Amino acid sequence: MRDENRHGQKIRDLEEQIADLKRRLPAHSVKPAMILRLEELEEELEQLKQKA
């Protein structure tokens, strides 16, 4: 049960991080590091959701 709670919390945390990063993305001249971080977070989120 605790693992399920931690798993769910990790998914919520990743969703929050992704939303925050998307809000901070500028309309133009996005730094490659921001794009890479967004892709990493989205990939990690997808992997966690597949395990659920």
Image (cartoon, rainbow, N blue to C red):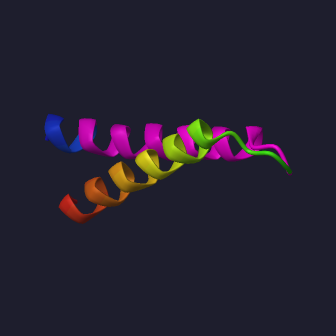
| x then y, percent, for residue 36 | 51, 45
Q: Can residue 13 be found in the magenta stretch?
A: yes
Answer with the quarter of the image where residue 10 lies: top left
User: In the picture shown, does residue 39 fall above or below 20?
Assistant: below
Going by the image, does 12 lie left or right of 23? left
Q: Residue at x 63, y 46 (%)?
A: 19
Q: Residue at x 45, y 37 (%)?
A: 13
In this view, which residue lies farthest toward the bottom?
50
Q: Residue at x 59, y 47 (%)?
A: 35
- Magenta highlight range: 6-27
Q: Main secondary structure of the magenta part?
A: helix
Q: How many numbered badges does the structure rendering display?
A: 0
In this view, which residue lies farthest toward the right?
27
User: In the picture shown, does residue 49 fall above or below 22?
Assistant: below
The foreground one among 50 and 2 is 50
The foreground one among 31 and 25 is 31
Going by the image, does 33 lie left or right of 50? right
| x then y, percent, for residue 30 | 74, 45
Answer with the quarter of the image where residue 50 lies: bottom left
Answer with the quarter of the image where residue 7 lies: top left
| x then y, percent, for residue 4 | 20, 44
Q: Residue at x 44, y 45 (%)?
A: 41
